[in-house]
Amino acid sequence: MNTQPDNTTIPLRFNEQGLVPVIVQDAETGEVLMMAWANAEAIRLTSLTGAAHYYSRSRQKLWKKGEESGHTQQVKEILVDCDEDTLLYKVIQTGAACHTGYKSCFHRTLNGTVTQKQLVRPEDVYTK
């Protein structure tokens, strides 16, 4: 599937599932916050609204960052890599970017050392 968002001029290269990976970076500090997937509609909505939208592979649906948690991402810039198959969202993050309650999803070393303080407990934010 290779449907392009209607508001792009660069021909993005989607994978077989119609998705591209999105690396999310704090626009002010440069810290990498998370990685998610986006389809053409998520990219279109992100570009249109300035609010980060993604595609959940497990739930098979679009989602807006912060729709449940209130921990939103205001997208300041969208960059495309040289192969046109990965995006970089530079964002202003409100609250935790990680669903486990940390500012960044990259909060552990390979040996399991936690490198950040947990901002919120997931059970206090998310409902099942």
Image: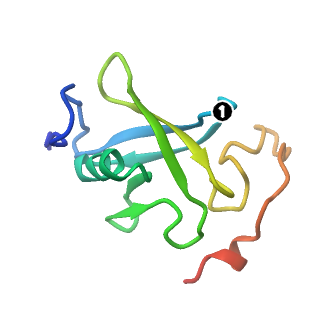
Q: Quadrant of residue 28?
A: top right
- Going by the picture, which residue comes out furthest to the top? 82
118 up-or-down from 84: above or below:
below
Q: Element type at marker 1? A: loop
x and y percentages locating residue 103 in the rendered image:
71, 50
x and y percentages locating residue 67 in the rendered image:
49, 69
Residue at 34%, 47% in the rendered image: 38
Quadrant that contains the C terminus: bottom right
Q: In this orientation, which residue lies closer to the viewer: 99 or 110? A: 99
Classify mark 1: residues with Cα within 10 Å, few (<14), some (14-19) or many (20+). few
Residue at 79%, 60% in the rendered image: 119
Residue at 23%, 30% in the rendered image: 13
Q: In this orientation, which residue lies closer to the viewer: 124 or 94? A: 94
Numbered circles on residues, count: 1
Tell me how the rendering is colored: rainbow
105 up-or-down from 13: above or below:
below
x and y percentages locating residue 40 in the rendered image:
23, 46
Report whether 77 appears left or right of 9. Answer: right
Residue at 76%, 70% in the rendered image: 121
Quadrant that contains the N terminus: top left
Q: Quadrant of residue 30?
A: top right
x and y percentages locating residue 79 in the rendered image:
40, 27
Report whether 36 appears left or right of 42. Answer: right
Q: Quadrant of residue 47?
A: top left
Circle 1: residue type = Glu
Q: In this orientation, which residue lies closer to the viewer: 75 or 103? A: 75
For mark 1, what is the residue?
A: 28
- Going by the picture, which residue comes out furthest to the bottom? 128
